[in-house]
Amino acid sequence: MFFIAFAFLLVIVFIGSIVYSKKSNIVGGIQSSIPWICVLLLLVVTTFSSVKIIPTGNVGIIYEFGSIVNQKSEGLNLVSPWQDMKLANIRIQKYNYKNLECFSQETQSLNMDLTINFKVSPSIIQDLYRNIGTNYFEVLIFPKIPQIAKDETVKFKAIEIAPNREALRIAMRDRLKDALQEYSIEVVDVLLENIDFSPEFKQSIELKQIATQKSLEEQEIVKQARYKAEQVVAKARGEAEANLLISNSLTPEILQYTMIQKLSDKIEIMIMPSGQNFILDPSGLLNSE
């Protein structure tokens, strides 16, 4: 628009100077140089309006009288002088969502911090600008993230969200990819940076963990006590069985031999009652048990 307005102004000045020179019969002087100055200015403005430099990571969207007619890639480009150009970013961009409120399966409230990385396809970005506009992020991407996040978190119970954090992130990324693919917007990744629950819920989880730990400790104490009791029972059973085996293996001859071994080695003469072989009767010992 600037070029058209400026060119129109130069044409008026050019025609006016020629008409004025003819009516005034002026030959030479600055008045006669005005048309040539106008032509020179028109050439300079045309050159500057036609040469466009597009920096790396951008695409030039070409507008003609308000309508998008073409796009240019990065580097030096020539366009019609009456056309305008706006830069469109095709690099990977990111947006951070802070304290995004979601809900678990049992309607437990939680807050989420996440980042989305995305970029626009450079080949048909003019279609995106033509159909949606330069504010495509606010129109397409921004409202979808909260909805998708809520749809995915509600599939898990509150205590399952943290262990399934990676599965939750992948599910949100894939759903967003499918939703934006038709607009040639590529979702590079969705990063789940933080998940936070209410203080009351975190306190209840902490108390539950403490109770579980105490229960495990008490179970261990009971287990140890049971083990010691079983050891005592096993020891008593073993001693009883050993005593029974010893008792069953004793014979009068063994008892007699044992008693002889217990007698003092200083005894040389032993007086025994008439008619007995030994002063002590082993059978009497066995019967005494």
Image (tube, rainbow, N blue to C red):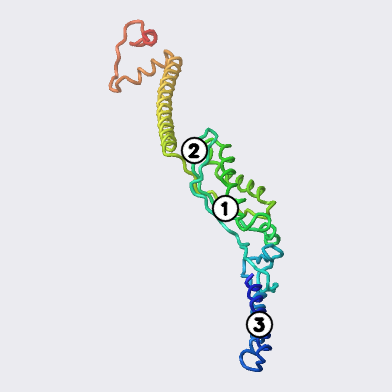
- Residue underneath mark 2: 109
Place of residue 130 in the rendered image (x, y in percent of width and height, measured from the top left): 68, 58
Q: Of the residues shown, which amino acid type is indicated by label 1?
A: Ile
Task: Pick the residue in front: 246 or 252.
Answer: 246
- How many labels, in total? 3
Which label's residue is closer to the chain start, 2 or 1?
2
Percent position (x, y) of residue 117? Answer: 58, 55
Residue 224 spot, x, y in % from top left: 41, 28
In the rendered image, the quadrant that contains the C terminus is top left
Could you say which disc has been placed on residue 16 in the image? 3
Residue type beneath disc 2: Ser
Of circles 3 and 1, the one toward us is 3
Label 3–label 1 contact, CB within 8 A: no
Location of residue 277 in the rendering, given as x and y in whole percent from the top left corner: 37, 10
- Which numbered tag is attached to residue 116? 1
Q: Which mark is residue 275?
A: none
- If you read the primary sequence from the N terminus, does the residue marked by circle 3 or circle 1 appear first? 3
Q: CA distance from mark 3 to mark 2?
A: 75 Å
Q: Please tell me whether mark 2 sits on a helix, a strand or a loop.
A: strand
Q: Is residue 154 above or below residue 282?
A: below
Q: Give the CA separation, mark 2 to mark 1.
A: 22 Å
At horizontal 31% and vertical 19% (from top left) the residue drawn is 263
Q: Residue furthest top?
A: 275
Mark 3 and mark 1: Cα distance apart in space: 60 Å
Name the one closer to the observer, 88 or 265: 88
Q: Residue at x 61, y 51 (%)?
A: 139
